Image: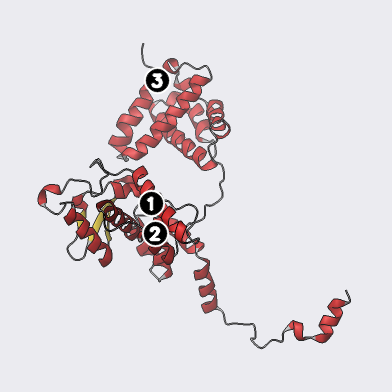
Amino acid sequence: MKPTDLAKALSQYLSVYLPGQRNVSPNTISSYRDTFKLFLTYCKQNGLSIERLTLAQVDEALILAFLKWLEEERNNGISTRNQRLACIHAFFRYVQTEHPVGLVTYQKILAIPMKKTPKPTVNHLTPDSLQLILAQPDPATSGGRRDATLLSVLYDTGARVQELVDLRVRDVRLDPPPVLSLTGKGRKTRHVPIMSNTEVVLRQYMAENRLLHNGAQDRPLFCNRQHRKMTREGVAFILDKYVARARAVSSAIPDKVTPHVLRHTKAMHLLQVGVNLIYIRDLLGHVDIATTEVYARADTELKRKALEQAYPNMVAEGLPQWNQDEDLIEWLSSL
């Protein structure tokens, strides 16, 4: 069977354009791939032959029906719906230059708007809660020492969980000043300093696991029990385990603590001790300072202190207590 124009365009987009011309990460390609797997599944369920599906059949009405199916049948949230739509938009921006004959149809698809979503709150841990979680791994076992090192590095660097699991021995520099090289979104690398306590536990961990000799440069920094590269799910499992233990000790631990919460926590702690937003932006690997400003907007205590410094206290401290005014009490009692 001769491949359709949709099959050719989608194959070229995922296997050549994204990795070759856009140089996007494998995780981004996987996200686009999953979107179109869902889209083709929806088409198949609604009587459309995937083998014969063409670009001319993919119009605004079909995309809107697919988005509705995501929300109503698969119970996806608005943010997930918007993410799928963003992948579809990106594909049709590519298609409109490769197959301009359907430009009007493609532009109608590109005009489908994102749904408004409430701004998510920035969940973070207090210093006491963080210390309690980091104290849970058992230092008497090799697994506990690995987990303690992993969680310490995750917090201290403010790394995304994928950046953490992608770390290799060659990305670690323990000589002063100790630095980790993280490769983030868009395959951009940034160099993040680590604090002395983290450097000590990381050096001990690497010495114990024979990661300091020259032949280990390409080995993953953190491995699972099968001696394979740690996964994002594995990191989340480790964190959940110690969060549950810490919650049994203190009710102050939030209900949900994900690896990304440790990233938020690092940013909030830096902000609270007066570190400039520009430095926090560079540490986290944000492209735009506006992304980092969400932490400043989220910290109500910083807002209160800023207002106290900006304006004098206009309320006198010696105002009389209302419950000592007998005439007022008598009037209130008569109501």
In the structure shown, which secondary structural element does the residue marked by tag 2 occupy?
A: helix
At label 1, which amino acid type do we have?
Answer: Leu
Residue 35, image quadrant: top left
Is residue 261 something one can see in this rendering?
no
- Comes first in the chain, label 1 or label 3: 3
Q: Position of residue 7 (x, y in %)?
A: 38, 21
x, y (%) of residue 94?
Answer: 39, 32
Q: Is residue 278 above or below residue 76?
A: below
Q: Nearer the viewer, residue 310 or 244?
A: 244
> Vertically, is 147 above or below 64?
below
Q: Secondary structure at mark 1?
A: helix
Q: Are marks 2 and 1 in contact (CB under 8 Å)?
A: yes
Mark 2 and mark 1: Cα distance apart in space: 8 Å
Q: Residue furthest front?
A: 140
Residue on which disc 1 sits: 239
Q: Residue at the left extreme?
A: 214
Name the front one of labels 3 and 2.
Answer: 2
Crowding near pointer 3: few (<14 within 10 Å), some, many (20+)? some
Give the class, few, some or many, for how many residues have Cα within 10 Å of label 1's Cα (few <14, many ≥20). many
Name the residue type under label 2. Ile
> Which residue occupies 36% across, 16% down?
3
- Mark 2 or mark 3, which is nearer the start of the sequence? 3
Q: Nearer the viewer, mark 1 or mark 3?
A: 1
| Residue at mark 2 | 133
Task: State the image coordinates of residue 279 (x, y, percent, origin top left).
Answer: 35, 64
Whether tag 1 and tag 3 are in contact, CB under 8 A, the answer is no
Residue 134 visible (yes or no): yes
Residue at the image point whose x is 23% and y is 50% from the top: 221
Whole-Å distance between the Cαs marked 1 and 3? 46 Å
Disc 3 marks which residue?
5
Q: CA distance from mark 3 to mark 2?
A: 53 Å
